[in-house]
Amino acid sequence: MKILISLLRSVLNTLLMLSFIASAHGAIVTGDILVADPAASRLWRVDPATGEEQAFAQVSGARDVAVSATGEIYVLGRGVGISTNVFQVDPKTAAVTQVNTTPISSFAGLGIGLGPDGSIYVVGGGSGSISGVHKVDPGTGVVVNVTTTWNSPSIPTDVIFESSSSLLVTSLSTGGGVYRVHVDTGNQVAVNTGSPWVGPTGITNASSGGYIVTDIHRDAVFGWDGTATDPHLISENFPGADPRQSVVDSAGMILVADSNGPSGTRGFVIKVDPSDGSQIILAQGQSLGLDSPAGIAIYQAIPGPDGDFDQDGDVDGADFLVWQRDPTIGALNDWQSNYGTPSLLAGSRIAVPEPTTVLLLLTAIVAAGLQGQLSRQLQTNRKKE
């Protein structure tokens, strides 16, 4: 009996190690930094603690990335020629599917933003009639033009949802700044343009209210309150001299995609402390790493059931591994009761356990059962003595 239990424990530990290796290079989990890289046509995953970068999905011309409130990952990429497409990337399998079923006008998409109703907004272009703002229905894939022309003599570069009726759009070069665009009418109003803006390319929510705006031509990141009041400089002179877009993490740090110029020269992910503007290189592309980071986002998993210890939206063998390393994270009973349960918001997507996961579960159950049996046998023997 002891030999059998020892053997099963050895098998279990081996499977747990395999599960650990798979999870380390598998599904995207909460807190992972996602970076869109148009030169490499990839969506990268960057570990927020170590800065380790891994190529997660191949997306043609990946220019920007956004994560919805329910955990969907959307990447702005390239279609045929200079046309633009929106792709959805599965955070578990890295499968890529095109969202828009009707064409997005032939223009170079530069930025993507999400509305509270799940609508996808895309901005970009060259100038005049080929620049603009477009809305994509993620359910039907239908594309609607929010604007038919772009009034500014510059190019819209990024977009963020401001309210139920308006968007804030950054605009590059001449007349550069931030514009307010009415969702229904497409009317555009300059909110804050000109100096100190030179070439705003990204806008995101700040942790303390207001916005963080990256300016590629100014080589700087600004804080802005959303009004006509001039923005304030937070940090400048980035290692790649090419800050494209940014996102704010849970600690209030600003993560900047610093593209570092043309393809072939490696880019950076820079962590900026908004209190003093100091910069730390979190990730730097190596020979096979980040090429030209442009868009950046932080993944937040959709809520999972009890027992989802790794917060990836379901309960599987990987969660048991997390619990084994830290039993204080939750109750094992929750994992046992909900094993195989998909995310509460995953709709009809059903998680099918892999053979290794099934074997892991069976081995754990058998080992636990044999341990219990051995314990009862030992108690019986003591009573006889």
Image (cartoon, grey):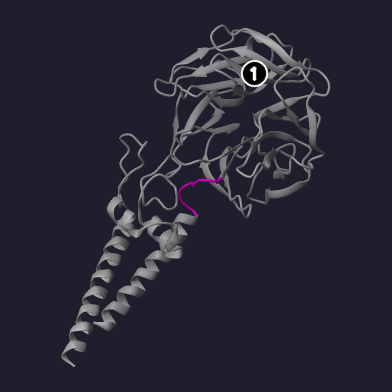
Q: Is residue 350 above or below residue 375?
A: above
Disc 1 element: loop
The main secondary structure of the magenta stretch is loop
Q: Is 289 positioned to the left or the right of 238 in the image?
A: left
In this image, 132 relative to 5: left or right?
Answer: right
Q: Does the magenta segment cover residue 364?
A: no
**Quadrant location of the N terminus in the rendered image:** bottom left
- The residue tagged 1 is 125
Quarter where residue 293 is shown = top right
State the image quarter where residue 329 is shown. bottom left
Q: Is residue 104 visible?
A: no
Q: Amino acid at mark 1?
A: Gly
Residue at 68% over, 43% down: 253
The span picked out in magenta is 25-32
Q: Position of residue 116 (x, y in %)?
A: 49, 24
Residue 283 visible, this orientation: yes
Label 1: few (<14), some (14–19) or many (≥20) C-alpha neighbours in 10 Å? many
Residue 29 on the magenta span: yes
Find the residue positioned furthest to the front.
383
Quarter of the view holding residue 65? top right
Residue furthest out toward the bottom: 385
In the image, residue 264 sits, relative to residue 227, either above or below, namely below
Q: Name the spot of residue 17 as percent of width and height, x first.
A: 43, 65
